[in-house]
Image: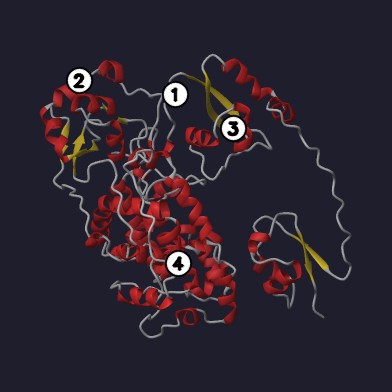
Amino acid sequence: MFRYIITSAIIILYFSVSAFAQEPDSLIVDFDLAADTTLVDSMASDSMLKEEMKLEDDLNEIFSERMDSLLNSAEFRMRFHFDSTEVHFTDQFPTNIPDSVYIRRLQDVEMAIDLSYNDVVKKYIQMYTERKRGLVEVMLGLSAYYFPMFEETLDKYDMPLELKYLAIIESALNPTARSRAGAVGLWQFMYGTAKSMKLEVTSFVDERSDPVKATDAAARYLKRLYDIYGDWYLAIAAYNCGPGNVNKAIRRSGGKTDYWEIYYRLPRETRGYVPAFIAATYSFEYYKEHNLIPQYPNFSLSVDTVMVNDYLHFDQVVASLEMDKEELAALNPMYRRNVIPAKEDKPYPLILPNNKLMTFIDKDTAVFSYNREKYFPNNTLVNPTTSSGSYFTPVDIKGKDKVVYTVKSGDNVGYISSWFKVRSSDLRYWNNIHRDMIRVGQKLAIYVPQGQKANYDKINMMSFAEKQQSVGKKVQVAEKKTESPLDPAYVYHTVRNGDTLWEIAQKYAGISADDIMRLNKLSNDRGLYVGQKLKIKLKS
């Protein structure tokens, strides 16, 4: 009985200038670049929008931080061996490029969707081509593997091929990327959306991390959104924040359906999607002009697929084919526990380098029978203790004892690292922590010197003061601050969760968001916090 089927489609991965077809992930409203080179002014239908956009100058910090976390993730460290001296990022590149050059280059890009240019777009371009060059060079290399898949699927649904760039913004082309909110994969699907798009998510398989299946689902979902709005900019915004938030922004702007006119009504992170898309498109089209050199991953760029219909463990494949387990995992990121739970009536794909495919076929029986009783006792599927993919947990470290610490109120990564005498970077790596985000009740794996587990276990029972004292730190008792008396000349608004300046202004006749910002010395919504009291000067 054959336990695999060779698929008819062979994925040949390539890298060339043509691999970087210039077409956005986030599709763009129709701005005629050739008609007007003063695009900043042509974008805004009212003068306020231009001022509001200036307040978002630091918006790309959201993407910048996300990109940093992806670049330092276990997935990328494994794929590119960043600790190796063989990896060199280029550090010589042009700066202070005139706006006219950016505009001309964007005009020269032949795409189904026009590309706008303004100060926000410029900042994203500079982020990609100057500040985050290492990650862009990594993504250039990865795109040789993923973009042909994306283009084939988008072409199947007769959609703009430019949409492939959305995966850059969503995941930096990391198939096991996982957001704080729980979105997973190249296209960052939440669990509920994934299930509605018929993606399989189980203890063993997460098709959100399957490049082929997830891309097909993303294309279908984007097509739905475009059918709703008839505008790619709005469809892309809805892909990020949901149609409900886009509809709300349209209503709050008086029914306007131009992306740039509802820009300030969109959730903060979503505002950056179209500018980031334009910048990503530019960066991949003109990477040579910025001396960006692709860094290729440490796995084969020429692969083939077989369908297996019996249980198979990665270790069986690795031992039988004498291949690297990290490479096998990188090519098959959809399997969360290094196990393919295939059955006769439900086969699953196995991606292999072309130079290993015939060996797999020749050793068919030997591969499946290798240590079978160890991996599948009584030919049953058991739950392995290690996991991989989007739920990365490192295997226990040799020579170290593992302590599980429960995060308490007031804890942060720095405190915990000092209490356990470990590096913060190790703590983040062991627990897949991004941007130092931890939550009360979260369980953290911490590796301490062998034989000292009992001593470190006691930290779980200590008060915050006791933990600080254990590392020679004293707890400062904060003095209570007395609030200034409220000025009777003003009305005070107490900020609630989810409030924005625009929404607050609507509650008071004749008051604008600008009035509130000037009176309370705010530059944008980021200055708001729950419980804050804002001065409102009512108009007679």
Percent across and percent down for residue 324 are: 26, 31
Q: How many marks?
A: 4
Determine which residue is flagged by label 4.
Answer: 275
Residue count near mark 3 (Cα–Cα under 10 Å), binned few <14, some 14–19, many ≥20? some
Question: Quick check: 130 above or below 353?
Answer: below
Determine which residue is flagged by label 2.
Answer: 369
Residue 183 appearing in the image: no
Q: Quadrant of residue 221?
A: bottom left
Q: Nearer the viewer, mark 3 or mark 2?
A: 3
Question: Quick check: 376 above or below 187?
Answer: above
Percent across and percent down for residue 531 are: 75, 54
Residue count near mark 2 (Cα–Cα under 10 Å), binned few <14, some 14–19, many ≥20? few
Determine which residue is flagged by label 1.
Answer: 396
Residue count near mark 1 (Cα–Cα under 10 Å), binned few <14, some 14–19, many ≥20? some
Q: Nearer the viewer, mark 2 or mark 4?
A: 4
Q: Do the CB atoms of the residues marked 4 and 1 lie less than 8 Å apart?
A: no
Determine which residue is flagged by label 3.
Answer: 417
Which part of the image, by quadrant, shows the N terminus? top left
Q: What separation in Å lies between label 4 and label 1 (alpha carbons)?
A: 42 Å
Of marks 3 and 4, which one's residue comes earlier in the chain? 4
Left or right, 467 with respect to 267, comes to right
Tell me the residue at 53%/70% (across/down): 263
In what element is the residue under mark 2? helix
Residue count near mark 4 (Cα–Cα under 10 Å), binned few <14, some 14–19, many ≥20? many
